[in-house]
Image: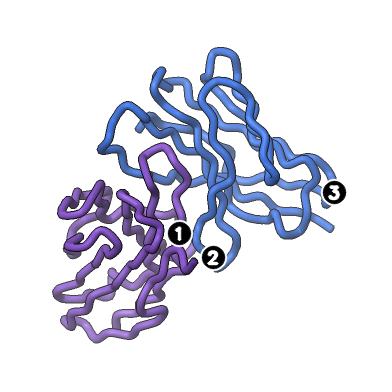
Amino acid sequence: NAGVTQTPKFRVLKTGQSMTLLCAQDMNHEYMYWYRQDPGMGLRLIHYSVGEGTTAKGEVPDGYNVSRLKKQNFLLGLESAAPSQTSVYFCASSYSPNTEAFFGQGTRLTVV
Amino acid sequence: DAKTTQPNSMESNEEEPVHLPCNHSTISGTDYIHWYRQLPSQGPEYVIHGLTSNVNNRMASLAIAEDRKSSTLILHRATLRDAAVYYCILRDFSSGNTPLVFGKGTRLSVIA
C-alpha cells in the first residue's frame, strides 16, 4: 500500500519555466490537498479538491493551477515559475473532511 | 474553520508527560478537534481527533474541556522522536467542502 506518492521529489526550475507536480493516492480518497511550506514556516493551503472533477482555492492559490481528472490523481501546475515559489510542496488526501489525512513526503522545488 | 490558539513553543524532558494546550473559544457544535504533528524534514502525520469526549490511541490522549473551548493533547511519556511541531485544527463535519488549514502550531522540544 503506497499511500500518497508525490512526483518528483526534487526539482530545480529556471524563472519562467513551467512544470507539473503529481500527487497520486491509492486509498480511494475523495479529498485531496496541495500545500506549500517555506523554511521555518507552517503549511499553507494552495488548492484542494473534494472529489473527482472538482477543485477549490485555498489560502495562497495565485500562480498555481490544479486539476483532478481522475480520483486518484491531483496535479499542481506552475505555468511560469518565479523565485517566490521556491518551497517544499506537500500533497495530502483523506476519505472525508473528518477522517485522517495522509501526507506525501514532499517535493522540494527551487526556482532560480 | 474556526480559529485555534497554541503556544509557539514548549519544552519537555524525555520520559515525562507533556500537555500541549489549544484554545478554540469560537468552536461550533459541528467542529471536530484534530491534532497533527510534523517531524523534522517530513510531511505532517495525524495524531488524534475528537468531538466531545476524551479520546485515547496508541500515540496520545486528547482531553476536551466540558465547554469545548479548549483541549489538551497529552503525550504520556515523551521521547526524543516526539520532538515536532504540533498542530491543533478544527474541522466542520457538517460541511462537505471544508479544507484542512494549518495554523502555526507548537514546536515541542524534548530534552534527553
At 32% from the left and 54% from the top, the residue drawn is A32
> Do tag 2 and tag 3 residues touch (Cβ < 8 Å)?
no
Q: Quadrant of residue B65?
A: top right
How far from the left and from the top, in percent, is residue B56?
67, 34
**Three-letter code for the amino acid on which mark 1 is drawn:** Phe
Q: Judging from the image, what secondary structure is the residue with disc 2 in?
A: loop
The span from disc 3 to disc 1 (Cα, nearest Å) is 28 Å
What residue is shown at x 24% (from left), y 67% (from top)? Answer: A75
Observer-side mark, 3 or 1, equals 1
Labelled disc at residue B42 = 2
Relative to B81, A26 lies left or right: left
Above or below for B99 versus A45:
above
Label 2 resides on the chain identified as B
Question: Looking at the rendered structure, which numbered label has been put on residue B15?
Answer: 3
- Residue A92 falls left or right of residue A52: right
What distance separates the C-alpha of mark 2 from that of mark 3? 23 Å
Residue linked to disc 1: A103
Colour chain B is painted in:
blue
Which residue sits at x=44%, y=44%? Answer: B103
| Label 3 chain ID | B
Callout 3 and callout 1 share a chain = no
